[in-house]
């Protein structure tokens, strides 16, 4: 007979069976704001469908299963032949198939494609972030391949396809393909100038033979990879197919999979090239300029991925506190907890708003808007630096809102906590992003002009924002010996961009709280230190996910 002490009371129900898109007011408003009127109805309906899928119990279970059953490397078959394959749990393939069919690799072929994809990617990250890696790499490979029109014509339809084909076979026989990337080597890391992988020209148009290694190779079961290697004229970008056109396997030796802190469902590999066939992309010696389009797109995905993780952490915290009762009332109504939740909600909304604004800039740049292209050059590394760094403290604080429940794996918060540092490390860690901002400031004055024009649209609306803009201009007026203070400068730039967007687009209570705490100095180093005079109840209510 069950004891009466085991009756379950005062516990929040699972946050499931809801539309992740329509429950996120900041996201839905951003999509509506940045899409042309004639696109909105179709896009909102499509994204609501993705949102219902993300919020379904089945999809959430797949995410947990993929995380709990990491990929397994098979270097050899039973007879001793090299196999170099990675086996994934069925849940991984279900998620990846759903992500591809939802258009998360298809931003380049339709109007408003980047905004629509960005919203979907932000939601999909909340289900299971690991499978977003091949989705991101496949999406981001398109601008790099466009350096070679012939290659782009061949591969772009496969990469933007809505068909997920997991079989390793020649790409020309597949209705859809995925891409990975290999840039870093163990002796150099982010300093790709130290790369030693060599590329020897072969007979044939743009064909080479690669010898060397990659310390981090993303998504090793993909159909193709963009890699950097040293050709006779210098560092060059190459396309390495996993399977050659005649059906034979390319030489792609997977030495081991990384044992990572988080991102457990995704395979990150160390690989060796030993007579590996490759096709040159772009000009010899122009490897970094060729692949930089892919890097920029994946950096924006780091921003969107972190925004998605933050949104899920905040949604779980607000949901829990909406049901949990303590000291005679709902936890969400307690002034101190309300302050914490509002502070977390501000960080989440600011990240989402900036990420979707940059996605809209991609759409405009694709249509030939050079100012928007210049904005991306400076704003993407600044956003990547700041938003990804805010993700970990948000996830940890959100877990604390659940108390002991948040420290238990079943809550899902530990997975968010482990995942939260990843985007600040991948695609160039914080110092790399800060130095990239300095390069843009020194070499591309149009990028700074575009950023200042963007923040200038909000001048006069909030005195704290105006003061922060003046402070930023002072910082920018003297870039001598700027490297030592690069992080300070980039942080200010990102905060001013976020503040300007919130002042223009967010409800007054959100913009007021952000400007007071992030720009006006009226806030502490920890979450939950907002001025008590603000309308915090409205900020929290806006962040509540309505299941």
Image (spheres, rainbow, N blue to C red):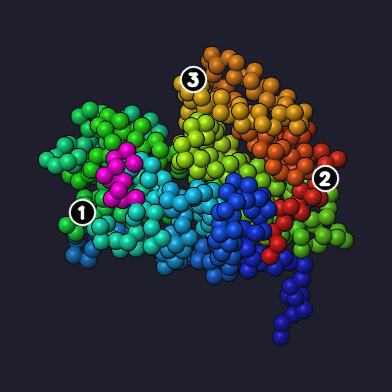
Q: Work out whether 259 lies above or below 96.
A: above
Which residue occupies 20% across, 29% down?
232
Write the start and end of the magenta stretch as one range. 146-156
Outermost residue, front side: 38
**Residue 506 shown in magenta:** no
Secondary structure of the residue carrying numbered label 3: helix
In 3D space, how far apart are the residues under numbered discs 1 and 3 (Cα atoms)?
43 Å
Name which quarter of the figure residue 391 lies in: top right
Residue 301: x and y, percent? 50, 45
Between 471 and 217, the one nearer to me in the picture: 471
Between 478 and 445, the one nearer to me in the picture: 445
Give the label on residue 442, or none: 3
Sequence-wise, which precedes: disc 3 or disc 2?
A: 3
Which residue occupies 31% across, 54% down?
223
How many numbered marks are there?
3
Can residue 503 be seen here?
A: yes
Residue 35: x and y, percent? 58, 49
Residue behind mark 1: 244
Local packing at callout 2 (Cα closer than 10 Å; few below 14, some 14-19, many 20+) is: some
Which residue occupies 80% across, 57% down?
331
Local packing at callout 3 (Cα closer than 10 Å; few below 14, some 14-19, many 20+) is: few
Secondary structure of the residue carrying numbered label 1: loop
In 3D space, how far apart are the residues under numbered discs 1 and 2 (Cα atoms)?
61 Å
- Dominant SS of magenta comes to helix
Residue behind mark 2: 535
Residue 513 horizontal side relative to residue 114, left or right = right
């Amino acid at each position: 007979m069950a004891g009466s002490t085991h009756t379950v009371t005062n516990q929040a129900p699972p946050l499931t069976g809801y539309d992740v898109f329509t429950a996120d007011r900041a996201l839905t408003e951003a999509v509506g704001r940045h899409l042309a009127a004639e696109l909105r109805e179709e896009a909102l309906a499509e994204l609501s469908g993705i949102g219902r899928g993300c919020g379904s119990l089945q999809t959430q279970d797949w995410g947990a299963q993929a995380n709990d059953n990491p990929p397994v490397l098979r270097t050899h078959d039973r007879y001793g032949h090299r196999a170099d394959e990675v086996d994934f749990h069925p849940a991984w393939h279900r998620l990846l198939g759903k992500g591809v069919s939802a258009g998360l690799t298809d931003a380049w072929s339709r109007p408003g494609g980047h905004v629509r994809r960005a919203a979907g990617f932000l939601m999909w990250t909340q289900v299971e972030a690991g499978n977003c890696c091949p989705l991101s790499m496949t999406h981001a490979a398109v601008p790099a391949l466009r350096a070679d029109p012939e290659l782009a014509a061949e591969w772009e339809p496969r990469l933007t396809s809505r068909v997920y084909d997991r079989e390793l076979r020649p790409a020309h026989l597949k209705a859809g393909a995925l891409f990975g990337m290999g840039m870093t080597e163990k002796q150099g890391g982010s300093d790709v100038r130290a790369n030693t992988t060599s590329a020897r020209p072969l007979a044939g148009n743009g064909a080479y033979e690669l010898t060397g290694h990659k310390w981090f190779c993303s998504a090793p079961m993909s159909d193709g990879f963009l890699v950097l290697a040293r050709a006779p004229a210098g560092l060059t970008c190459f396309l390495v197919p996993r399977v050659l056109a005649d059906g034979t396997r390319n030489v792609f030796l997977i030495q081991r999979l990384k044992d990572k802190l988080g991102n457990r469902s995704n395979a990150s590999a160390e690989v060796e090239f030993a007579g590996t066939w490759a096709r040159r992309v772009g000009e010899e010696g122009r490897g970094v300029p060729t692949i930089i389009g892919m890097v920029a797109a994946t950096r924006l995905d780091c921003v969107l991925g972190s925004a998605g993780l933050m949104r899920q952490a905040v949604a779980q915290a607000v949901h829990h506190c909406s049901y949990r009762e303590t000291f005679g009332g709902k936890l969400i109504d307690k002034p101190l907890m309300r302050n914490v939740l509002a502070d977390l909600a501000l960080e989440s909304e600011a990240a989402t708003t900036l990420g979707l604004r940059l996605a809209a800039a991609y759409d405009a740049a694709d249509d030939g808007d050079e100012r928007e292209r210049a904005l991306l050059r400076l704003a993407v590394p600044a956003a990547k630096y700041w938003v990804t760094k805010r993700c970990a403290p948000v996830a940890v604080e959100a877990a604390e809102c659940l108390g002991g429940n948040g420290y238990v794996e079943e809550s899902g918060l530990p997975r968010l906590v482990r995942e939260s540092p990843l985007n600040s490390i991948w695609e160039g860690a914080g110092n790399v992003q800060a130095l990239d901002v300095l390069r843009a400031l020194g070499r591309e004055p149009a990028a700074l002009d575009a950023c200042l024009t963007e923040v200038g649209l909000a001048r006069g609306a909030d005195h704290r924002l105006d003061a922060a803009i003046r402070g930023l201009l002072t910082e920018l007026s003297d870039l001598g010996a700027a490297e030592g203070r690069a992080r300070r400068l980039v942080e200010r730039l990102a905060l001013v961009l976020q503040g300007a967007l919130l002042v223009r687009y967010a409800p007054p209570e959100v913009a007021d709280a952000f400007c007071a705490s992030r720009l006006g100095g009226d806030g502490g180093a920890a979450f939950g230190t907002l001025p008590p005079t603000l309308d915090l109840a409205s900020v929290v209510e806006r962040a509540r996910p309505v299941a």
